[in-house]
Image (cartoon, grey):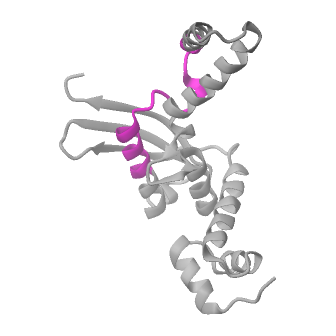
Amino acid sequence: MTPVNSKDVVTLREKTGLGMMDCKRALEATDGDFDKAIEYLRKKGIAKGEARIGRTAGEGIIHSYIHPGARIGVLIEVGCETDFVARSEDFQRLVHDLSMQVAATAPIAVRREDIPAEKIERELEIYREQIRTEGKPEQIIEKIAHGKLEKYYQDVCLLEQNFVKDQKVKVGDYVLEIAGKLKENIQVRRFARFVLGD
């Protein structure tokens, strides 16, 4: 491990909002490389967030967002464990970012389990037909169709989408990262997206 100076630790803390000791350990583990240290902290935050998934998220907020131009609006409900966290700046920013994500990308569900089975089967049937018309052998059609279904989930499930503010991060990982930082279970419960005239 490379020793790090306190100025670098403070700079990393300002960038990430995480604890001094976490930032110091991240810089030591990554030989003082800021980008790698941020990635290290992000992974650690996700792990902390995953450890909290089973806990009850009985508090939270309902947030409304109107996209500039007032033609798209979003209502979203996000749960957490305490009223204190629900009022925190980090949680409020997360919920606002999620509502902007919904406005920008028009997901149809929070997670893949929320999509009705008949809709998934209909999608699979469309993919199978497309693949058959391409003349692919019958024995690989199912495999290719399920590969296309995975891509479909990434397009239409909020938590599986790439985060619009950072395309290298999945929305679900961003939620877990904030959950780890706030030390609470955070659950995206539901959303509604309104488009003028729809």
Of 126 and 195, nearer the camera is 126
Q: Quadrant of the C terminus?
A: top left
| Above or below for 145 versus 63 | above
- Residue 152 shown left or right of residue 37 in the figure: left
**Residue at the image point whose x is 50% and y is 37% from the top:** 158
**Residue at the image point whose x is 68% and y is 45% from the top:** 53
Residue 70: quarter of image: top left
The percent coordinates of residue 96 (x first, y second) are 39, 51
| Residue range of the region highlighted in magenta in the rendering | 95-120
| Above or below for 41 versus 31 | above
Q: Quadrant of the N terminus?
A: bottom right
**Residue at the image point whose x is 45% and y is 27% from the top:** 108
- Most prominent secondary structure in the magenta stretch? helix
**Residue at the image point whose x is 56% and y is 34% from the top:** 154
- Residue 198 shown left or right of residue 135 in the figure: left
Mark yes or no: residue 62 visible. Answer: no
The percent coordinates of residue 153 (x first, y second) are 57, 29
